[in-house]
Image (cartoon, helix red, strand yellow):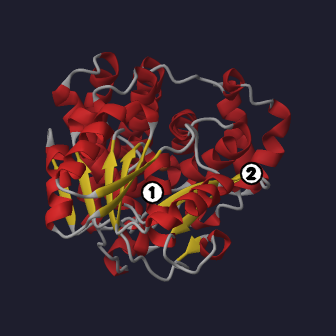
Amino acid sequence: MTVEMIQQVSTVDLRLPPRIRFGVDCIKDLAGDLVSAGYGRVLLVSCGGVAGVCDDLRVALAARDAAVEAYQPRDREPTIADFEAAAKALRGFNADAVVGVGGGSVLDLAKLLAAMLSGGQSIDDVFGADRLTRRDIYLTCVPTTAGTGSEVSPNAILLDEREQLKKGVVSRWLVPDAAYVDPRLTVSMPAHLTAATGLDALTHCIEAYANRFAHPLFDTFALEGVRLIGRQLERAYRDGDDLEARSAMALGSLYGGMCLGPVNTGAVHALSYPLGGEFHVPHGVANALLLPHVLAFNLPAAPQRYAAIARALGITDGDDETVAQAGIARLAELCRVCGIPRSLSQLDVPREVIGRLAASALTVQRLLVRNVRHVSLSDAEQIYRKAFAG
Ligand SMILES: [Fe+2]
């Protein structure tokens, strides 16, 4: 069945935070909103890079007589052990609200804490889809990158250090109650993070649009995300203070995040997970490096979809096949100008592990079943080989 045919018959859920507040300086409303909604014990989960924002938030909450417990996880993608240590340390505070301020890793941790601090489930019970049974604590997410889309998605990822694999929890209980998307918070993000997180967001949009479960309800968001990020990422990368470019990126990232729950991603993400799990290649970098190679592999299965993506990137001349090919070349060029390495060997990944990477990627069937083209073990090996060749 083609993507278009599936679109006509499939049913999707639009499950988003009941409140999405978007705009420059909207973070300033958060403390007042929380307290006036009746929350008085706030667990603030953040990363080191946003200390100023969190200090302001803490002062504003304290001025309204709210108790605040601040927690700063280690600056890395969170492991299962990190989550368990945080949960143990924070359970006694009895938070009635969790606020996550940071990049995707921090938000994922905040989401899991809000869902599991008061419950009886262990983290091993909830990996996979729809296994979380409840969340009693109010959850607000404030992204400081643009981004993972975690602030609106039902997903959270932890690293299983024993298996060297990233594992996902997917649940409607992980969709936050509120997302405050303030583009000004992304201004201080360094250029390399702007590139990696921006290309992750772009990959969300592309993989949601060219997807076996693509749907008209989300196609509009996905294509608009491609258009915004495709045109503004380089600007935001070159000048981090450009608030107009930052706002476009924040919006594009939000659109990508909105597609994650109902449609999700595909082979780019599936093949990137083993690179993150075993070699700690940052998620956005792994995606960006794989993106042109996976798209070239996928193209014969959905030329119209990839042509529409290319047109959203501004390429207009030619038939679908020609335009789509030019779109893939444009994406490769965007990765290059944003400083993404061309080859996996530049990231100290040895060639000898291709077989192991491919076998590991094939276990990520929750995403591979969504890919527009079936990916076999030898296909995955071939794509990794191309990513080594650059
Ligand atoms: Fe992603």
- Quarter-of-image position of residue 216: bottom left
- State which quarter of the image contains the C terminus: top right
- The answer, for residue 308, to whether it is visible in the render is no
Tell me the residue at 23%/20% (across/down).
241
Q: Position of residue 256 (x, y in %)?
A: 34, 51
- Mark 2 against mark 1, which lies toward the viewer? 1
Tell me the residue at 60%/62% (across/down).
88
Q: Nearer the viewer, residue 253 or 221?
A: 253
Q: Residue furthest right?
A: 352
The kind of residue on which mark 2 rests is Glu
**Image vertical order of residue 290 relative to residue 370, above or below:** above
The residue beneath circle 2 is 161
User: Mark 2 vs mark 1: which is more N-terminal?
Assistant: 1
Q: Position of residue 30 (x, y in %)?
A: 19, 52
Tell me the residue at 58%/22% (across/down).
341
**Image vertical order of residue 151 relative to residue 28, above or below:** below
Q: Position of residue 8 (x, y in %)?
A: 32, 76
In 3D space, how far apart are the residues under numbered discs 2 and 1 (Cα atoms)? 20 Å
Please report contact status of discs 2 and 1: CB closer than 8 Å, yes or no.
no
Q: Nearer the viewer, residue 46 or 71?
A: 71
- Identify the mark at residue 110; answer none if there is no mark: 1
Side of 249 relative to 381 (left or right): left
Q: Position of residue 365 (x, y in %)?
A: 64, 65
**Image vertical order of residue 286 relative to residue 264, above or below:** above
- Quarter-of-image position of residue 127: bottom right
Side of 85 relative to 331 (left or right): right
Q: Nearer the viewer, residue 338 or 378?
A: 338
Q: Nearer the viewer, residue 269 or 125?
A: 125
Q: Residues within 10 Å of mark 1 (few under 14, many from 20)?
A: many
